[in-house]
Amino acid sequence: MSQGKLEQCTGPGPAALAGIRSGDVVVKVGDTPVSSFDEMAAAVRKSHGSVPIVVERDGTAIVTYVDIESTQRWIPNGQGGELQPATVGAIGVGAARVGPVRYGVFSAMPATFAFTGDLTVEVGKALAALPTKVGALVRAIGGGQRDPQTPISVVGASIIGGDTVDHGLWVAFWFFLAQLNLILAAINLLPLLPFDGGHIAVAVFERIRNMVRSARGKVAAAPVNYLKLLPATYVVLVLVVGYMLLTVTADLVNPIRLFQ
């Protein structure tokens, strides 16, 4: 086996011999619950011998014992993410391939709103997880493997955008650009100064406060004194700039590459 050259696979693999079918969803490998193909592959690589694997088929959980086969794969070594050959476990399965879904003129509009809603939810989850990614970014800067789920800066976005264009993946490029704009919009709407969301939050507070005062027969209060909010604004600025420098450094020394 050499890097960039794959051997031909023939015959049924261990999963097929154990009765696993196309369309089955693997939910557990041994004692390890899995929720994605990457988690399943990582659990299988560490396994050997006959291992119980739980799959969902038509809503029913099925347990089958699979004889894990040892094979060679190119695996990141965890030090800079360089690939090296290693003997790992394999069962001969792959991620489900989902083809493009085509919509008509009238069905495209509700599908667009549904997709945008799903994407917005995922963006919210990603923003909430930002503080938990600091450790992974620091490890990547120190020479560890770069987690593809870590945040990127404009430098990393440029690298990923360039990779997609270089490979002619224009649909992926435009989708990535749309995601980037949605994320920037979501960050700008955070109810923290100096973001626009912070100014909106102050305006909403003033409006509600004055409505309450008006209902009590009082005159409107003076506008919010932004000078009193400066300490909180400086704290937000320091955190944002610090996180930005962290991601830029990680993207310069250990960037995420879609194609290696």
Image (spheres, rainbow, N blue to C red):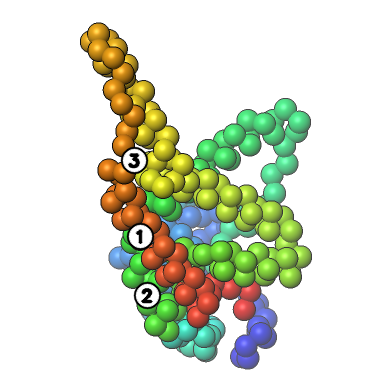
The residue shown at (55%, 47%) is 182
Residue under label 2, please give it.
138
Q: Closer to us: mark 1 or mark 3?
A: 3
- The amino acid pointed to by label 2 is Val
Relative to residue 180, is residue 150 drawn left or right? Answer: left
Is residue 71 depicted above or below 180 in this figure?
below
Residue under label 3, please give it.
226
Q: Nearer the viewer, residue 188 or 146?
A: 188
Pinpoint residue 7: horizontal percent, then vertical percent: 65, 84
The alpha-carbon separation of the residues under discs 3 and 2 comes to: 35 Å
Quick check: marks 1 and 2 in contact, CB under 8 Å?
A: no
Pinpoint residue 195: horizontal percent, then vertical percent: 44, 46
Q: Secondary structure at mark 2?
A: helix
Residue under label 1, please give it.
239
Is residue 149 visible to us here? no
- The amino acid pointed to by label 3 is Tyr
The alpha-carbon separation of the residues under discs 1 and 3 comes to: 19 Å
Relative to residue 201, is residue 154 drawn left or right? Answer: right
The residue shown at (38%, 65%) is 242
Mark toward the start of the polypeptide (1 vs 2) = 2
The residue shown at (63%, 30%) is 110
The residue shown at (33%, 70%) is 135
